[in-house]
């Protein structure tokens, strides 16, 4: 139910490609693009039908509010105040009066229409270049009404893609660990929510300690560490059915799991007699392979997006550093050489960068470096933060941070934060409870 | 003879004053030797005179002299109580990444296990469980709290 596929009928009105407005996302965007998100227009009958089904007064406005929020949160766009809009939504969608939109300094305009057709929600929307006075994109799709939030996210992704030339990341979910209670006896549950914090659901009850959930690239499965019966083991969970199973038959603790990019293997650490090494298990034939064999601690493995290499954390040079190796364990190479300790390496979905946590002089940093270790950039510094996870387009990192709740350094609160790859647009992600260990899904509508 | 007595006495005084200064500095830094916890806060006892836990330096997994003494006491007690099995619970402080700390906790508990085994305790009687930094005893964020949290605790399993 949760992951019912969204059937998108892309009725492609001809898309004209001009060299129109573009947003450069490779730099910290200090002047976000002013955009007007006109409420989606809706006829009286449709409005009443959706009101009955979804308990929302005006679903057109609700969907456009999602788009507006997504674009704003990205830091690349500046959605303008609706009070200044001169043109009515239905008229604007037919033929915008560009002078009016120009007057309020909008450079891009999003218009659209929602209708109730055969018990379904049909949305069409258009993206306009206000200065050029041209339509940039027009799309329509139909889905079950309960998918209305996803409709908002998909529109946001399409707009983002058209204006930045990169894939979007709005129609995605975050799996994380919800935390409650005192630090000495934290209750932790798996939780999942939309990328904007809505549709939050708890997946475990908190009876046992759970850590480090990670999404499969196929989105149906999650791998995580559970202390079920006080035996810390890597588990596989189908979020659609709730079925779960232990991964492999190891005589000791398995931890630090992640999927391979094709979703067919799980890579993780297995600890035995004080030594942690990296293993993979094939989920189809259940074959377990040992990837590293070294008396040091080898953990936090993460595949490159082509599956050919693995980055991991090892203390073979005495302290935690980041290494890369071929996926068969050959050609091990240390890549982190800066001051301090380095952990939690995660390969970017674009392949060119590795995100990490760095500990130096009592501070924790989230940073990125190239896969050969050059070009280290620290994005954010704090008392305690770790575990970055990439947005599927490799533009944004989500991580978690613990802060003290009073000036004496007592009490603490754990929250999810996101930051742009450029180091700009750092934001707290709102969650119902304290939260840690976030993992970003790939795009659901791919 | 007299001279050597005087020397001995002054040496004793010197030693005593050194010990006193050491005590004073230890108190100042809050029961730490280096950054290993040497106090008895949070320590429980498996039996009279048999402490249940040992402490570690930051990022370290080797046992200190004091830790080895504690584990020898545990071994003696376990030899006398041959029906009792134990779980060694390894922990780390919060100043590390979660996954690395799970491995570190496992390694600390295994340091304790290895030492118990060299004193004749069969590995069948010992299991190991790492909590990484998930179960601190002291929720503070200061060197003293961290030192109490870097530990391996011997817990009766039956």
Image (spheres, coloured by chain):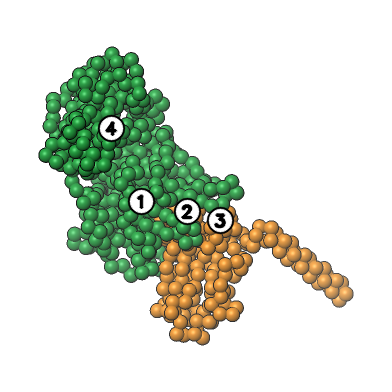
Q: Can you tell which of label 2 and label 3 is closer to the viewer?
A: 3
* Colour representing chain B: orange
Return the residue nearer the eye: A230 or B15: A230
Return the residue nearer the eye: A40 or B18: A40
Q: CA distance from mark 4 to mark 3?
A: 47 Å
Q: Which label was assigned to residue A61? A: 4
Residue matched to label 3 = B140
Q: CA distance from mark 4 to mark 1?
A: 30 Å
Would residue A334 be found to the left or right of residue B112 on screen? left
Q: CA distance from mark 1 to mark 2?
A: 19 Å
Q: Can you tell which of label 2 and label 4 is closer to the viewer?
A: 4
Q: CA distance from mark 2 to mark 3?
A: 15 Å
Residue matched to label 2 = B96
| Secondary structure under the numbered disc 2 in the rendered image | loop
Q: CA distance from mark 1 to mark 3?
A: 24 Å
Question: At x 12% / y 32%, what residue is drawn?
Answer: A11
Would residue A247 be found to the left or right of residue A438 on screen? left
In the rendered structure, the residue with mark 2 lies on which chain? Answer: B
Label 1 close to label 2 by CB (< 8 Å): no
Q: Which label was assigned to residue A176? A: 1
* Residue count near mark 3 (Cα–Cα under 10 Å), binned few <14, some 14–19, many ≥20: some
* Colour representing chain A: green
Question: At x 13% / y 36%, what residue is drawn?
Answer: A117
Badge 4 or badge 1: first in the primary sequence: 4
Q: Position of residue B104 (x, y in %)?
A: 45, 61
């Amino acid at each position: 139910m949760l992951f019912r596929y969204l059937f998108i009928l892309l009725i492609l009105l001809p898309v004209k490609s001009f060299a129109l407005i573009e947003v450069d996302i490779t730099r910290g965007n200090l002047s976000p693009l002013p955009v007007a998100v006109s409420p989606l227009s809706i006829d009286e009958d449709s409005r009443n039908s959706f009101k009955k089904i979804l308990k929302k007064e005006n679903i057109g406005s609700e969907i456009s509010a999602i788009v507006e929020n997504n674009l704003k949160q990205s830091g690349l766009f500046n959605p303008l105040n609706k009070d200044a809009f001169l043109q009515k939504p239905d008229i604007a969608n037919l033929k915008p009066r560009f002078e009016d939109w120009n007057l309020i300094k909008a450079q891009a305009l999003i218009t659209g229409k929602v209708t109730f057709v055969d018990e379904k929600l049909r949305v069409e929307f258009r993206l306009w270049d206000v200065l050029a006075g041209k339509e940039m994109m027009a799309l329509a799709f139909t889905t079950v009404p309960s998918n209305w939030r996803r409709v908002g996210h998909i529109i946001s992704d399409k707009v983002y893609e058209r204006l930045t030339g990169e894939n979007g990341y709005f129609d995605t979910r975050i799996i994380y660990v919800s935390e409650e209670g005192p630090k000495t006896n934290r209750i932790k549950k798996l939780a999942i929510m939309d990328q904007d914090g809505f549709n939050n659901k708890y997946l475990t009850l908190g009876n046992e300690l759970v850590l480090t959930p990670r999404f499969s690239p196929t989105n149906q499965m999650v791998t995580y560490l559970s202390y079920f019966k006080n035996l810390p083991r890597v588990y596989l969970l189908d979020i659609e059915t709730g079925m779960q199973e232990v991964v492999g038959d190891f005589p000791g603790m398995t931890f630090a799991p992640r999927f391979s990019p094709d979703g067919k293997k799980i890579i993780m650490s297995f600890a035995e007699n004080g030594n942690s090494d990296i293993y993979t298990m094939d989920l189809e034939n259940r074959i377990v392979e040992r990837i590293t064999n070294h008396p040091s601690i080898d953990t936090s493995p993460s595949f490159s997006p082509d599956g050919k290499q693995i980055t991991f954390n090892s203390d073979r040079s005495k302290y935690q550093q980041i290494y890369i190796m071929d996926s068969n364990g050959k050609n091990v190479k240390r890549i982190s050489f800066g001051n301090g300790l380095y952990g939690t390496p995660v390969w970017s979905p674009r392949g060119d960068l590795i995100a990490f946590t760095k500990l130096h002089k009592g501070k924790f940093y989230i940073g990125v470096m190239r896969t050969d270790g050059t070009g280290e950039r620290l994005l954010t510094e704090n008392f305690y933060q770790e575990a970055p996870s990439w947005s599927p387009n490799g533009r944004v990192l989500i991580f978690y941070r613990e802060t003290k709740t009073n000036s004496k350094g007592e009490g603490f609160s754990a929250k999810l934060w996101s930051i742009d790859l450029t180091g700009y647009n750092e934001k707290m992600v709102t969650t119902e409870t304290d939260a840690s260990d976030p993992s970003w899904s790939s795009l659901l509508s791919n | 003879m007299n001279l050597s007595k005087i020397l001995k006495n002054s040496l004793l005084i010197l030693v005593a004053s050194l010990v006193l200064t050491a005590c004073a500095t230890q108190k100042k830094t809050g029961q730490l030797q280096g950054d290993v916890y040497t106090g008895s806060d949070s320590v429980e006892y498996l039996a009279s005179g048999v402490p249940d836990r040992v402490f570690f330096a930051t990022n370290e997994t080797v046992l200190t002299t004091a830790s080895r003494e504690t584990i020898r006491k545990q071994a003696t007690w376990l030899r006398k109580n041959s029906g009792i099995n134990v779980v060694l619970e390894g922990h780390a402080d919060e100043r590390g990444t979660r996954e690395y700390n799970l491995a570190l906790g496992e390694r600390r508990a295994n340091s304790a296990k290895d030492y118990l085994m060299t004193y004749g305790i069969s590995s069948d009687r010992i299991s190991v469980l790492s909590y990484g930094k998930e179960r601190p005893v002291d929720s503070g964020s200061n060197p003293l709290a961290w030192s109490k949290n870097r530990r391996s605790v011997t817990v009766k399993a039956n």
